């Protein structure tokens, strides 16, 4: 099997798995209890928070553990919009953001949507024009999950702050894959999800800048300083810190490896004379290859590659039941002749050169023998 759907999820890192085992077995104490048996859980929680904070240039008290990227996004949008008069987001956000915004629209909030150019990039001057005297929550993703485009986040943050707004970024696809320093960027909130960087599924975090009075999204006990109730998932938190630290230490090496694999795939496809467009900007998440083939069906390509034991995606995994053209492919204006033939190959650090060659050759075989 060749797994090339790393934007959907990644394989759990072996060290991260081993780091979590003691907290599933012998050290199962509840971190909120005062007895000495719980001390190891409490210490692990503190150390993981420090490790994660260090990886993104935050202070440990600015990291709040959540159950996933979707929860982090819901928290940022639903509670962030309590602090503001309106929300501005982009048309290519993940549905965790778009549907949270829709919920806020249903309860009377104004939501405005920024367009993107043909590479999927949001323009800071479009944002500047959209912001008026109303206090605004701006949410623009760090990198798009379908086409990999990295947004000009620092510029968007500066525009937002100049107009007195708050800025959130969904960095689920970017954390652990490109360098991120929250204080340098100036973001007020940032969402992350463990399973996109070789940690287990069902764990994530929200960075909340010190001083931002964000109400809790999940009410209950006093965990996470009373901001996110629910007994902490210590084992997964420990694994997330381990996986993030490892990935951040290997960012340059991984990027070089992944760019090489991307080139292999693209060169082989081009030399076969196939008619296709590569989507996204040149400044994208390493390993992301979004391709739109002329007069093809992405769904057919996915299933034919599946028969050859190759896992790829047609768009975002969270949307795989929806076989229509994705909102991202629509927003960047991929011509009709190509739009339906869109697939996403997302390579990860464990993929090899020979796997990249096999993926490209399998695609050529499928497309030439329809
Ligand atoms: N945001 C983006 C950009 C994503 O790609 C995803 C998952 O695909 C999510 C949010 C949701 O993350 P999770 O699967 O952890 O809920």
Image (cartoon, grey):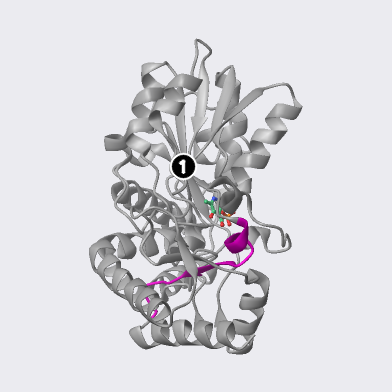
The residue segment tinted magenta is 336-351
Quadrant of the displayed image that contains ligand 1: bottom right
Up-down: is 66 above or below 241?
above
Residue 231 can be seen, yes or no: no
Q: Position of residue 363 (x, y in %)?
A: 52, 82
Q: Secondary structure at mark 1?
A: loop
Up-down: is 63 above or below 366?
above
Q: Position of residue 38 (x, y in %)?
A: 48, 55
In the image: residue 268, left or right of residue 115:
left
In the image: residue 251, left or right of residue 196:
left
Q: Is residue 365 magenta?
A: no
- Please identify the residue farthest to the right as the structure is shown: 106
Up-down: is 366 above or below 30?
below
Q: Position of residue 327 (x, y in %)?
A: 62, 49
Q: Position of residue 61 (x, y in %)?
A: 38, 37
Label 1 C-beta lies within 8 Å of the nearest ligand 1 atom? no
Q: Is residue 338 magenta?
A: yes
Q: Which residue, given by chain and number where applicable, does mark 1 sit on?
A: 117
- Please identify the residue farthest to the top as the structure is shown: 133
Work out whether residue 105 or residue 284 is closer to the camera in this orientation and state it: 284
Q: Residue at x 44, y 38 (%)?
A: 122
């Amino acid at each position: 099997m060749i797994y090339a759907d790393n934007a959907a999820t990644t394989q759990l890192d072996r060290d991260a798995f081993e780091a979590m085992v003691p907290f599933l077995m012998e050290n199962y104490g509840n971190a909120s209890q005062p007895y000495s048996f719980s001390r190891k859980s409490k210490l692990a929680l503190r150390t993981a928070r420090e490790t994660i904070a260090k990886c993104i240039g935050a202070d440990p008290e600015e990291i709040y553990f959540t159950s996933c990227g979707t929860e982090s996004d819901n928290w940022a949008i639903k509670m962030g919009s309590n602090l503001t008069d309106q929300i501005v987001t982009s048309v290519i956000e993940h549905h965790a953001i778009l549907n949270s915004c829709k919920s806020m629209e249903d309860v009377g909030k104004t939501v405005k949507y920024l367009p993107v150019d043909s590479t999927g990039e949001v323009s800071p001057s479009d944002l500047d024009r959209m912001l008026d005297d109303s206090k605004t929550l701006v949410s623009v993703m760090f990198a798009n999950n379908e086409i990999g485009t990295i947004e000009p986040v620092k510029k968007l943050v500066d525009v937002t702050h100049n107009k007195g707004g708050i800025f959130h970024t969904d960095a689920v696809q970017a954390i652990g894959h490109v360098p991120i320093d929250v204080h340098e960027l100036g973001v007020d909130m940032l969402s992350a999800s463990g399973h996109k960087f070789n940690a287990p599924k069902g764990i994530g975090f929200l960075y909340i800048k010190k001083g931002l009075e964000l109400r809790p999204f999940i009410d209950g006990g006093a965990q996470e300083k009373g901001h996110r109730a629910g007994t902490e998932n210590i084992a997964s938190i420990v694994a997330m810190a381990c996986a993030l630290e490892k990935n951040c230490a290997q960012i340059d090496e991984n990027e070089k490896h992944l760019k090489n694999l991307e080139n292999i795939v693209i060169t082989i496809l081009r030399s076969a004379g196939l008619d296709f467009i590569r989507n996204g900007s040149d400044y994208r998440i390493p390993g992301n290859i979004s391709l739109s083939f002329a007069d093809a069906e992405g769904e057919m390509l996915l299933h034919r590659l599946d028969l050859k034991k190759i896992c790829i995606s047609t768009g975002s995994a969270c949307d795989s039941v929806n076989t229509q053209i994705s909102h991202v492919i629509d927003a960047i204006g991929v011509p009709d002749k190509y739009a339906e033939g869109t697939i996403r190959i997302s390579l990860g650090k464990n993929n090899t050169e020979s796997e990249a060659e096999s993926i490209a050759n399998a695609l050529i075989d499928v497309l030439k023998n329809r």
